[in-house]
Image (cartoon, grey):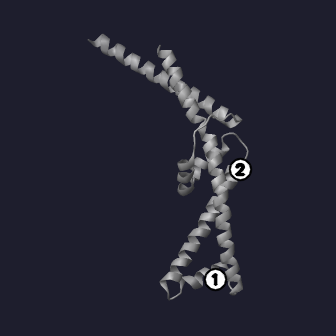
C-alpha cells in the first residue's frame, strides 16, 4: 500500500514537473511580444531624437534637464524602458540556446515578473509530450520518489527508536 502511495504522489509530481517546459515556452512567446513592442517604442524615440538633432543619450540628457517635471519623468521612464528592453533581449538570447533544460534554467535565472505573472494567469495545465517535457516528468518522478522514500525511511527509523525507548 505504501509503495502505491509513493508511486501515485511521484506521478503527480512528474505531471507537475512536465509543465515547466510548456510554461517556459509560453513565457518565451510573451517575452518575444514584449521585446517587439518595447523595440517599437524605443525606435520611435530614437527616430524623434534624430529628427531633432540628438542621439539617444543626448535626448535623454536634454529631457532630464528640462524645467517641466513631466518631461523629466518621461526621460526617466524612457531610460527604464531602454534598460528593460536590454534585459529582455539578454534573456531571450539565453532562452534560445539549445538544450532540454536551457530554456527553463534561463527563465528561472532572470524572469521578468510582469511577463511571468501574465503568463501564469493565462497558463492552462496540459500533458505535453515533447522531449523536454518527458525529461522533466522523468526527473520529477525520480526526484519525488527518492525524496518520499528518504522521508519514509527516516520516519520509520524514528518510529522504531521511539517504540524501543518505551
- Percent position of residue 148, x then y: 48, 24
The answer to whether marks 1 and 2 mark residues whose Cβ atoms lie closer than 8 Å is no
The answer to which of 24 and 105 lies nearer the viewer is 24
Considering only vertical position in the picture, is 141 above or below 166?
below
Residue that label 2 marks: 96
Q: Residue furthest left?
A: 166
Element carrying mark 1:
helix
In the figure, is residue 164 to the left or right of 143? left
Q: Classify mark 2: residues with Cα within 10 Å, few (<14), some (14-19) or many (20+).
A: few
Q: Residue at x 62, y 69 (%)?
A: 82
Figure quadrant of the C terminus:
top left
- The label nearer to you, 1 versus 2, is 2
Q: Residue furthest right?
A: 98
- Percent position of residue 51, x then y: 71, 85
Considering only vertical position in the picture, is 45 above or below 22?
below
- Percent position of residue 111, x then y: 57, 53
Element carrying mark 2:
loop
Tell me the quarter of the picture where residue 154 sits. Answer: top left
Considering only vertical position in the picture, is 83 above or below 56?
above
Q: Residue furthest bottom?
A: 67
In the figure, is residue 116 to the left or right of 25? left
Residue 141: assigned label:
none
Q: Tag 2 or tag 1, which sits nearer the N-term?
A: 1
Q: Classify mark 1: residues with Cα within 10 Å, few (<14), some (14-19) or many (20+).
A: few
Q: Real-space Cα distance between discs 1 and 2?
A: 33 Å
The answer to which of 128 and 61 lies nearer the viewer is 128
Amino acid at each position: 500500500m505504501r509503495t502505491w502511495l509513493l508511486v501515485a504522489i511521484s506521478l503527480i509530481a512528474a505531471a507537475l514537473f512536465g509543465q515547466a517546459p510548456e510554461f517556459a515556452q509560453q513565457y518565451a512567446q510573451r517575452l518575444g511580444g514584449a521585446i517587439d513592442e518595447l523595440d517599437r517604442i524605443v525606435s520611435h524615440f530614437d527616430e524623434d531624437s534624430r529628427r531633432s538633432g540628438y542621439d539617444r543619450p543626448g535626448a535623454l540628457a536634454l529631457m532630464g534637464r528640462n524645467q517641466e517635471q513631466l518631461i523629466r519623468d518621461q526621460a526617466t521612464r524612457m531610460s527604464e524602458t531602454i534598460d528593460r528592453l536590454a534585459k529582455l533581449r539578454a534573456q531571450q538570447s539565453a532562452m534560445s540556446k539549445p538544450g532540454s533544460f536551457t530554456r527553463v534554467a534561463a527563465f528561472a535565472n532572470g524572469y521578468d515578473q510582469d511577463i511571468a505573472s501574465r503568463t501564469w494567469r493565462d497558463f492552462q495545465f496540459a500533458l505535453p509530450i515533447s522531449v523536454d517535457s518527458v525529461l522533466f516528468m522523468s526527473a520529477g518522478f525520480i526526484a519525488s520518489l527518492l525524496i518520499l522514500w528518504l522521508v519514509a525511511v527516516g520516519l520509520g527509523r524514528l518510529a522504531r527508536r521511539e517504540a524501543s525507548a518505551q
